[in-house]
Image (cartoon, rainbow, N blue to C red):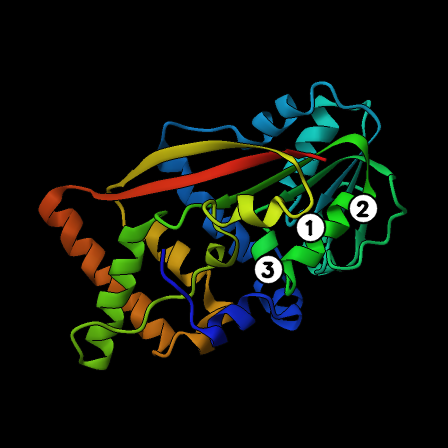
Amino acid sequence: MTSNTAQQDAAVADKSILANSAYADGRHLAARQSIYRWQQPQYDLPGIVVAELTDTSGTVIDIGCGNGKFVSRLHNDRPDLQVVGMDISAGILANVEKPVLVADAQALPFADDSADAVLALHMLYHVGDIEATIKELARVLRPGGVLIASTNSDTDKQELDRLWARAAGDVLGIPEGPARVSLSSRFSLEKAPGYLGTAFKDIRVRKLPGTIELTDPAPIVAHLASYEAWADQCGVPFRETVSRAEEIVTAVIRRDRLFKIECLGGLLVCRL
């Protein structure tokens, strides 16, 4: 994973970009999620979350629920739970099962001790003040409640980081171009326990390593293109760099018969 510049970090947490561009609808998120179809081993992330909530009853709030794949699974597998989806973008909530609400994770519209479980799945790197948001998550949890957070490692998909830097360099005519924007770096798997430890005492980390092997460049191109909302922070012509990356990947697949990507994400199960 690349290290963001201060400008890139600010853009990753920019509410206007998040609500009106990056997650105005589910298109870009779905493109980023789709690459995991080729990962081995396969992880049923919604199923893992459901299993972690086996002993939970009552209200579950999915904060930053995005396109609602976890909300949908909970409604299906645990109809006994009162599931609420929440996101900063009204657009991405259009097809998420109700009830849903538009709100900022840094100021949750829920009373103290009102939730039995809170989900913060691949979203805490998008908030401006991570520590304050984690305190908000703890505030709404009832005693004995659980927070399930998720993110990626600092080592996740480094092959794509190198691909982007090479493609950007080719576009600019220099040996190595600017690094691509990293969404997870502000709250990576390595940084997350330190942040969460400011409000939670019991933190269990479940790492989910895997390998993606692709024989078609299309999923890689879609993944890179899904960062379009942050194109202005890339320091390089965005579409031209994506196009050049496609040429590089196509050549690698022709030579090696595949393009391999090493992944490392994980869940953090936290109790007060």
Residue 126 tag number: 3
Q: Of discs 3 and 2, which sits in the foreground?
A: 2
Which one is in front in this view, the residue at disc 3 or the one at disc 1?
Answer: 1
Q: Is residue 194 left or right of residue 202?
A: left
Quadrant of the rendering where the N terminus is positioned:
bottom left
- Binning the other alpha carbons within 10 Å of mark 2 as few (below 14), some (14 to 19) or many (20 upward) gives some
- In the displayed structure image, the side of residue 150 where residue 211 appears, left or right: left
Tell me whether the residue at label 3 lies in contact with that at label 1, contact meaning CB atoms closer than 8 angstroms. no
Residue at the image position 71 percent from the left and 58 percent from the top = 132
Q: Which residue is mark 1?
A: 134
Q: Which mark is residue 139?
A: 2
Q: Closer to the N terminus: mark 2 or mark 1? A: 1
Residue 243 place in picture, x, y as percent: 29, 67
The amino acid type of the residue labelled 3 equals His
For the residue pair 188 and 38, the one nearer the viewer reads as 188
Position of residue 20 measured from the top left corner of the image (x, y, whole percent): 65, 69
Q: Is residue 256 above or below residue 204?
A: below
* Disc 3: CA contacts within 10 A as few (<14), some (14-19) or many (>=20): many
Is 38 situated above or below 198? above
17 or 127, which is in the foreground? 127
Distance Cα–Cα, label 3 vs label 2? 19 Å
Marks 2 and 1 close (CB-CB < 8 Å):
no
Q: Earlier in the sequence, mark 3 or mark 2?
A: 3
SS class, disc 1: helix
Q: Is residue 175 left or right of residue 145?
A: left
Of residues 74 and 149, the one drawn nearer to the viewer in this rendering: 149
Please provide percent x and percent y for residue 238: 37, 73
Q: How far apart are labels 3 and 1 at the CA level? A: 12 Å
Residue at the extreme left: 255
- Residue density around tag 1, few if under 14, some if 14–19, many if 20 or more, within 10 Å: many
- What is the x, y in percent for residue 139? 80, 46
Looking at the rendered structure, the secondary structure element under dot 3 is: helix
